[in-house]
Image: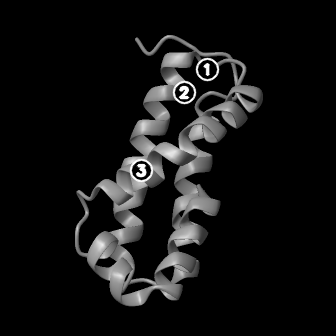
Amino acid sequence: MTALIEAIYDMVNQNQAVCRVLILENTNSTVLMRMIALAKDDSIAYWRKELPNASETDLEMMYTHLSNGLMHVVVEGYDKYSKDEIIRFVSRVVKASLSLFQSPQRPLA
């Protein structure tokens, strides 16, 4: 996720005018959805190795949740928070989410 955030910042910084219209001012854009889709396979493959207790369904749902929610944090917070603040927040949320699957699952109820 951090690499995706870094890529967004780099792309916006290199192409300010275009990226502001395509990404920052249009949170439902096809560009954002394509960026999320591009990172999906590598992210899930990495998590699969690191989280042997997580099912494929868990990994898919976690990616959908994290990528879409955190992408909006990045886009909507781009001019509001510093890059470092966003990366720190995203890293904390991702680590907390992944920690749910680092030990054998216990029933919720």
Q: Residue at x 50, y 10 (%)?
A: 107
Residue 72: give x, y in percent of width and height: 34, 61
Q: Residue at x 69, y 26 (%)?
A: 48
Between label 3 and label 1, give the one nearer the viewer: 3
Residue toward you, 57 or 7: 7
Residue toward you, 77 or 37: 37
Residue type at mark 2?
Leu
Label 3 sits on residue: 34
Label 2 sits on residue: 59
Label 1 sits on residue: 54
Say whether marks 2 and 1 touch (CB < 8 Å). yes
Mark 3 neighbour class, 10 Å CA radius: few under 14, some 14 to 19, many 20 or more: few
Mark 3–mark 2 Cα distance, whole angstroms, equals: 19 Å
Q: Tell me: residue 14, above or below residue 85.
A: below
Mark 2 neighbour class, 10 Å CA radius: few under 14, some 14 to 19, many 20 or more: some
Residue type at mark 1?
Ala
Mark 2–mark 1 Cα distance, whole angstroms, equals: 6 Å
